[in-house]
Image (cartoon, rainbow, N blue to C red):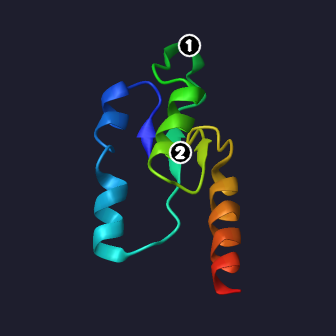
């Protein structure tokens, strides 16, 4: 998860997917951009988030607002579906 209003918060994640896979193995990892309710303050575009997710072979990119609850449940739906697919 990173802050859509702070470009450094995404930059800090650059090596995280690789570190997770190195220590845990292949698991579904998704990228979550938080603070979508602050549209006028955002510094990271949807395209930038999507490109980061694709370049790191992540399950999906989603934007949420922890403040309003927008898309928060969707994170769990996506991960649950990925878990079910991996079990089959």
For the point 50% across and 48% down, the residue is 31
Q: Position of residue 2 (x, y in %)?
A: 42, 40
As rendered, which of 37 and 6 lies closer to the eye?
A: 6
Relative to residue 48, is residue 9 drawn left or right?
left
Residue drawn at x 54%, y 23% as measured from the top left: 45
Mark 1, residue position: 40
How much space separates mark 2 and mark 1, taking CA atoms?
25 Å
Q: Residues within 10 Å of mark 2 (few under 14, many from 20)?
A: some
Give the quarter of the image for residue 59: bottom right
Q: Nearer the viewer, mark 2 or mark 1?
A: 2
Mark 1 secondary-structure assignment: helix
Q: Residue under label 2, please give it.
A: 54
2 or 1: tag closer to the N-terminus: 1
Q: Say how many tags the image has.
A: 2
The residue furthest top is 40
| Label ID, residue 60 | none
Task: Tell me the quarter of the picture where residue 19 sits.
Answer: bottom left
Residue shown at 51%/45% (left/top)?
53
Residue 1 in percent (x, y) is at 44, 47
Q: Residue at x 30, y 29 (%)?
A: 8
Classify mark 1: residues with Cα within 10 Å, few (<14), some (14-19) or many (20+): few
* In this view, 6 is above or below 18: above
Q: Do the numbered discs 2 and 1 sit on residues whose CB atoms are within 8 Å?
A: no
Residue 5: x and y in percent read 44, 24
Q: Left of 21 or right of it: where is 86?
A: right
Question: Residue 17: horizontal and vertical position, in percent?
Answer: 37, 56
Tell me: residue 45, above or below residue 34: above
State the SS at label 2.
helix
Q: Is residue 42 above or below residue 4?
A: above
Q: Quadrant of the C terminus?
A: bottom right
């Amino acid at each position: 998860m990173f802050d859509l209003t702070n470009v450094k918060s995404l930059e800090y994640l650059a090596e995280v997917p690789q570190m997770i896979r190195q220590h845990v193995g292949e698991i579904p990892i998704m990228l979550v951009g938080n603070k979508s309710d602050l549209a006028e303050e955002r510094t990271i575009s949807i395209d930038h988030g999507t490109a980061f997710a694709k370049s790191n072979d992540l399950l999906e990119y989603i934007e949420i607002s922890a403040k309003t609850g927008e898309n928060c449940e969707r994170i769990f739906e996506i991960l649950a579906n990925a878990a079910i697919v991996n079990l089959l």
